[in-house]
Amino acid sequence: MSDSMQTLEVHNQSEYKYGWSTELDMDTFPKGLSEETVRAISARKKEPEWLLEWRLDAYRHWLTLREPTWANIHYPVINYQDIIYFAAPKKKLGSLDEADPELLKMFDKLGVPLEERKVLAGVAVDAVIDSVSVTTTFKKELGELGIIFCSFSEAVNEHPYLVRKYLGSVVPSGDNFFAALNSAVFSDGSFCYIPPGVRCPMELSTYFRINAANTGQFERTLIVADKGSYVSYLEGCTAPMRDENQLHAAVVEIVAMDEAFVKYSTVQNWYPGDKNGKGGIYNFVTKRGICAGFRSKISWTQVETGSAITWKYPSCILKGDESVGEFYSVAVTNNYQQADTGTKMIHIGKNTKSTIISKGISAGYSNNSYRGLVKIGKRADGAQNFSQCDSLLMGDKCGAHTFPYLEVDNPGARVEHEATTSKIGEDQLFYCKQRGLSEEDAINMIVNGYCKEVFKELPMEFAVEAQKLLAISLEGSVG
Amino acid sequence: MKPLLKITDLHVSIEGKKILNGINLTINSGEVHAIMGPNGSGKSTLGNVLAGREEYTIESGSIEFEGEDLLSMDIDQRALSGIFLAFQYPVEIPGVSNSNFLKSIINAKRVFQGLPELNALEMLKYIRSKMIAIEMDENLLKRSLNDGFSGGEKKRNEILQMTLLEPKMAILDETDSGLDIDALRIVAEGVNQLRSPARSFIVVTHYQRLLNYIIPDFVHVLSNGRILATGDKTLAEKLEDQGYDWIREGNSVTP
């Protein structure tokens, strides 16, 4: 074995930059989950009766479900009674000025653009700390265009018609174990509505942060893009370094009407655990969008570098004729991280098109699985799918797996699937180093080249962040 | 004068198999040494060992580069110190644009030399000026590094990198293989333009024809991991006429 292969086995944990936690005055529920917990959450949030019933319905359904075991991931049994289901900073915020200075400092550290200076960057942010949405910037500017962008709780009170109409319309409350759990106990999240014909002039952004210990985070995002509208939505996530595992079970629902286009980008950087696999976030997330209208389009781009476990399949239901679904993914696992991620493209309408580009990178002792379903319904004449799933292995202790599922019920459909697995080339490394690049720089260059097709789908600022994140995630995995 | 490169009794193996069996070679600044030999003689190994390729095990012997112990240096340190290997099979790196790669390696070198990095404009000017000299298509800058390049384009790209990095010791590993006569001429001209008292070359080749264009100061014949004969360019011509057999038979020749 060459030196370089040996150094591939040296897995120094790179510094997790977001690993601090903040002392905030918190209002927390005791551990445990029961109908009472669900009622208490709903009461605390002064929710209308229908929503409480919706939650309870989800809770009762959840009780009948079993945790899924089909994914290629392994973890100790989660004790759902040992989790705190609600934690919120105590102070209610009227404006940013009233915010806890500790909280603002935390956002500063995160680089969350809550402040005016960021107006220039054109990013509107909804920040969710633990369970509640803390503040939403730019509400006024967006309001003038008729765009609603606010916390989920606020939307429930101020736009009950929209919330009631679309909540659970894409991911039903009983959809799966984790979605049902979320539906029962979700504490907050973001809501976004873009009216007909409006092109949202700035990137909308949600930043999720788990801060409190022993707390699960269950947020919901609901995005409704009305006819002919456009929105680009960004999601970022970080968490403190803790020895115990923390559960994150979110739901994202997207509805795109006729000729609407929703672009949803995620840079997921939850704490991945230490180099021995201790701690880290269990990330069980259900993300789904429906292209309900003619020529509508939903594009998911994700860069997954964090979490001890990632279980996530952002999907598109292509119901409208000529609608388009896209999934671009980079999933990086290092040390003992496990990722089972991919997408589902459900073609229902005629001449629907989907594209799947998945790039998995495994290092250390990690396991990285792509799992994807392409389903072409009977009515979906002229449907087309192109899938490309590439896996890159760094070292020889990690694993890459591909589980493509294909169900074609229409003979006129065209489905193409390409898959490659490669090892990061000793030859490529040698070549770069022979030209004077350090091993670290060489790896970054090769890996970024490998991910280029996905990174180019990200908004500029995010793409730069993603590249840096990739470098940090793989730091020490080689050399 | 202190030699640029001094190889002393070098023994090298790969996966337990001996490839070099006691190489002695001294190269002074400004000299061009051709290394010839039949397939499997260890020609390419020598270049790869000088560049620091890790699959090889150094059994014994030493290599001094500018008086320093080369074998203790990392691959990138050797490169930055002035060793350049033009690959027989240049590696493809999809998704990394050629221009981005060239920028990175030029700036890595400049940082090592304590010079400021070149900005995008200066960089482009610098790279373009060198491309013209070797008649290289500028579109190759936008493409992924060597990805889908023809054999000739890859080799030109090697010569371009050599020209940009201005090494002290350039090793051309069978650069002539797979080239048509026009490409061969252009590559050789690229090398000739770089010949200077401050730069030495090792030209590894199986055929004599490259040496019609790059006139060597010394020709060494390698067989079974040993240098069996050393001469001037006439030795290469003799090899072309008579093949390698007369040397194998033990007619050791020294200058």
Image (cartoon, coloured by chain):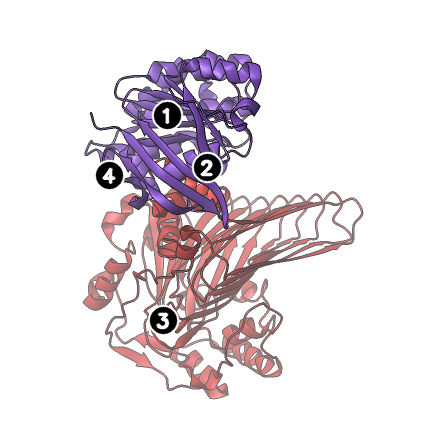
Chain colours: A red, B purple
Residue B120 percent across, percent down from the top left = 31, 28
The answer to whether residue A100 is seen in the rendering is: no
Q: Marks 4/2: CA distance?
A: 21 Å
- Disc 3 designates what residue? A130
Q: Is residue B159 visible?
A: yes
For the point 37% across and 51% down, which residue is it? A471
Image quadrant assignment for residue B234 = top left
**Mark 1 and mark 4 residues within 8 Å of each other at the beta carbon:** no
Q: Is residue A76 left or right of residue B65?
A: right
Identify the amino acid type marked 2: Thr
Residue contact at pointers 4 and 2, CB within 8 angstroms: no
Instruction: Give the residue number, with chain letter if any, for mark 2.
Output: B45
The reply to whether callout 1 and callout 3 are in contact (CB within 8 Å) is no
Q: Do circles 4 and 2 both sit on a common chain?
A: yes
Q: Position of residue A182 (x, y in %)?
A: 50, 73
Horizontally, residue A354 falls left or right of residue A55, namely right
Query: The residue under label 4 is which amino acid type?
Result: Glu
Q: Check the residue under mark 2 and report the chain it is in.
A: B
Along the viewing direction, whichever of B171 and A50 lies nearer the viewer: B171
The amino acid sitting under disc 1 is Met
Decide: is A417 above or below B232: below
Residues flagged by tags 1 and 4 on a common chain = yes
**What's the residue at 38%, 26% (across, down)?**
B161
From the viewer's perspective, is the residue at label 1 or at label 3 nearer? 1
* Dot label at residue B53: none
The residue carrying mark 4 is B68
For the residues labelled 4 and 3, the Cα–Cα distance comes to: 58 Å
- Mark-to-mark CA distance, 1 and 3: 55 Å
- Dot 4: few (<14), some (14–19), or many (≥20) neighbours within 10 Å? few
Residue identified by numbered label 1:
B162
